[in-house]
Image (cartoon, rainbow, N blue to C red):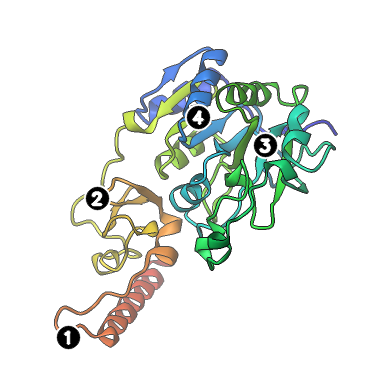
Amino acid sequence: MSGAYLGPAYDADSIRASLDSHRAHYQELDADALDEEVAAAIYQEKVVGWFQGRMEFGPRALGNRSILAKATSPKMQSVLNLKIKYRESFRPFAPAVLRDDLAEWFEMDVDSPYMLLVADVAERRRRKLTAAEEALFGIAKLNVPRSDIPAVTHVDYSARVQTVHADTNPRFHRLLEKVKARTGASVVVNTSFNVRDEPIVCTPDDAYGCFMATEMDVLAIGNFILRKSEQRPRAAATTGAESPLFPAELLACLKPPGGEGESLERIEGSFRCPETGALFPTSMACPHCLRAPISSATGSLGASRRSTRRIRSRTMRGSKSSAP
């Protein structure tokens, strides 16, 4: 087997039609110019959605349906977890590295094109913790940079490595060469193009939806590039409209993950934080954003729990009544 790129691909006309249907703002560039723009964005510590060619077969994103970021950034692991994946800040990410530079960064020298092999970061790339850092505990200690590529270095100095080869993925290989020219490191964070509990994106519509529902900065899809700052915000739901699953009382019990902002509003297919403009997919909101509302009259936690039970009861009745 040579490569796992066995899924569907989409030509420029299909991608353009999808983006136009969403009224997206985009630029169409030649391949080299787009790769330069993406390398520059990664260097500037922006998070990039990378959608190219045929989709990967299997459980790993291998450079065609990937979210890419700067591996040398000490803050990138936390940023990706909290603002893109919506999961715990300590969760590790995997590196993609040019095969010719593998031994420069990791204690291994065999092909790992499917991101299945684990190796330690090269000894010369590790950073010894100071006495003060060793004395830290929990998340504070986990967040201490441990190598020259902290965004992909786990607490035990290990990483699950993908080697990138020019013969199986020339486009991704060229991008890593451009990243190396800017950052000095031919390594990037490579995580699957999705959010927690959702499948990896397959179509241009999937990619645009995930891009707009997260705090991703840039989307490179074929030879089209989109910047979040240039996109129209999604239209909010009609004022006063309620879904049986998300009544106003329940919305009042939700807040954005990550501690930024104080409220959420329903929009089509997502939740939106009006204070920050951040978007959260519907599947992410309820299990991760519930907060116990405090009764303004009594301030009692017991009252808030009874309120939550009433909301749950009303939601279940609404669901049952709408069943066939």
Q: Report the Cα–Cα distance between label 4 and label 3.
A: 15 Å
Mark 4 element type: helix
Q: Could you tell which of marks 1 and 3 lies nearer the N-terminus?
A: 3
Tell me which residue sits at (52%, 41%) in the image. 73
Q: Could you tell which of marks 3 and 2 lies nearer the N-terminus?
A: 3
Q: x%, y% of residue 126?
A: 67, 46
Q: Is residue 179 left or right of residue 59?
A: left
Mark 2 element type: loop
In front: label 1 or label 4: 4
Residue where numbered disc 1 is placed: 298
- Quadrant containing the N terminus is top right
Residue where numbered disc 2 is placed: 274
| Amino acid at circle 1 | Thr
Residue where numbered disc 4 is placed: 43
Return the residue found at the far left.
297
In front: label 2 or label 4: 4
Mark 2, other Cα within 10 Å: few <14 / some 14–19 / many ≥20: few
Mark 3 element type: strand
